[in-house]
Amino acid sequence: MTIWDVLEPRFLAPLLAGIALTAACALLSVVIVLKRLAFIGQGITHAGFGGVGLAAFLALSGWWRDLTIFLFCIGTAVVIALLSRRGRVMIDTAIGILLVAAMGVGFLLDQLRIHLRGEGWYGTLTGGRHAPPTQWDAVLFGNILYLRPEDVWLAVGCAAAVAGLLALLHREIAFYAFDETVSRVFGVRTTLLHYLLLVMIAAIIVLCMKLLGLILVNALLIVPGAAAVLLSRRLSGVLIAAAVVGEIGMVGGYLAAFGIMGGRLPIGPMIVLILALLFAAALAFNRLRSARA
Amino acid sequence: MAEQHCCHQDHSAELASHHDGDAVCVDHVSFSYVPGVRILETVTMHIPRGTRLGIVGPNGGGKSTLLKLILGLLRPGAGRISVFGRSPSQACHAGMIGYVPQRHDVEITFPFNVAQVVRQGIVGRTGMFRRASDDDRRAVVQAMERVGIADLAAQPVGDLSGGQQQRVFLARALAARPQLLVLDEPLVGIDEVGQARFAQLMEEVHRAYGLTVLIVSHDLRAIVAGCDRVACLNRRLHFHDAPAGLTRNVLAEVFDHSLAGAGLGLGDLGP
């Protein structure tokens, strides 16, 4: 394969999905970085493992599998929020516990289904279906071959919905990220915004999973925002910079994976590597500028 | 002399019912974070509309807790609080409260300029998915002109001095066109000149907007001139009256005895 093979529809479609999701991720990442939600993002992505295991246990595939993972992510996010709400448990503690619990449950359920295969009640539960063995490396690092054509349209639609919601609510979200307590006193519905953001993050994670995998999707949810706040001090500048950094990482990583070693290298890690280099460049730029000032 | 002004049972019984003329009514409120350790003990006070109340007391005396209760960020363990006859959170959602938080509570590396921060004041009032009304946008411009930061509109908030940031947050609160203005330790980290300028500004704001003002401070001297009434809080309410009635004895009761005279610089007070 050469870099020009990207122009084939079967490779162009995932790239289109990637570009759309990256735009949504980049905007979300600015909120995540400013509101310091990076660790909760980690919690939600790892909850995805629980969802993958549960879907495998119930022998679900296609949309049902995606929905199960999505709901598992949302459920975990809600439990984290409820646990930490009353101040009884610190939020990073709650995330740390649920993160590993969800992963453990996921692997356990995935193993359990193999051992339960002969049991009658299990056959009734799954309706006699058998899920194919779980491709854990694809779950971890993504595999675009798992991307179905309809996924592309779902990704584009979801990315547009997330971007649209962020645009419509940008004043509320900016205030909420700037100072949550004060924004509540000024009449901003902070609880609603918090859950809305968690739902958006969970939806994006499930969609990005096939592209980047559950571990690497965190790069798209953090790096663009983290680099952007180093590059600009204006909100509009930060949003544009985040989108540019994200898209360079996505498109660059995609092309690099095709161009280097004849397409035998995985795309997800390539994208993450480029994003990390872009962050280093942003950091250097920031240092240079403040040294000159 | 001191006895007369201390807010004991006989006095509080009279205040317990809500007066229509009250902006804030705190009625026998107690609060504890940890069971058994009371931060506030049956506190009763009211703030008549259009007046300025300063709440002073030592650190850990429950000032910030009382403030959070009035802002609806905490719920009282016992007793009742009303703000313009509503619950505190209803009053917040109705945009009745303008809040100037303590300055170190704010993340200052944010990519927001002055105008964007002041505009935050009208976000709750505008409501989700709606455009700001012309009146609200005018209120933003007026608030920036009133506190003298109109020329800083495009500056990142992080670049401003402490006193300038304080004025930005005051403008944000005024842009909300509230009926009650709440300031939490507004003078912390601001030099003497800045403090004097801020006091003068508060005087102008009070006159121009006709607001009810509630200032919380650990520094009595800094706020006493700009208040119609002072409340001294150290778990209980020890004094709640015009500042002229403050005596050394009351202060000794509220603050640590050693601080009462010397640290507060209240040399002109009576015995």
Image (tube, coloured by chain):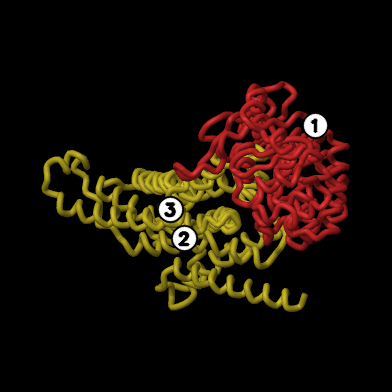
Residue A44, numbered label: 3
Q: Circle 3 — which element? A: helix
**Chain of the residue that carries numbered disc 1 in the rendered image:** B
Q: For mark 1, does the 10 Å Cα neighbourhood hold few (<14), some (14 to 19), or many (20 or more) residues?
A: some
Q: Position of residue A200 (x, y in %)?
A: 51, 47
The amino acid type of the residue labelled 3 equals Ile
Q: Position of residue B170 (x, y in %)?
A: 77, 47
Q: Earlier in the sequence, mark 2 or mark 3?
A: 3
- Closer to the eye: label 1 or 2: 1
**Chain of the residue that carries numbered disc 3 in the rendered image:** A
Residue tagged 2? A217
Q: Which chain is red?
A: B
Q: Are marks 1 and 3 in contact (CB under 8 Å)?
A: no
Q: CA distance from mark 1 to mark 3?
A: 49 Å
**Chain of the residue that carries numbered disc 2 in the rendered image:** A
Q: Is residue A40 left or right of residue B263?
A: left
Residue tagged 1? B50
Q: CA distance from mark 2 to mark 3?
A: 11 Å
Q: Nearer the viewer, residue A177 or B242?
A: B242
Q: Quadrant of residue B214?
A: top right
Q: Position of residue A92 (x, y in %)?
A: 45, 57
| Picture quarter with the N terminus of chain A | bottom left
Q: Which chain is yellow?
A: A
Residue B144, numbered label: none
Q: Are marks 2 and 3 in contact (CB under 8 Å)?
A: no
Instruction: Please check whether the numbered discs 1 and 3 fall on a single chain.
Output: no
Q: For mark 3, does the 10 Å Cα neighbourhood hold few (<14), some (14 to 19), or many (20 or more) residues?
A: many
Q: Nearer the viewer, residue B192 or B40?
A: B40
Q: Circle 2 — which element? A: helix
- Closer to the eye: label 2 or 3: 3
Instruction: Please check whether the numbered discs 2 and 3 fall on a single chain.
Output: yes
Q: Is residue B168 above or below residue B45?
A: below
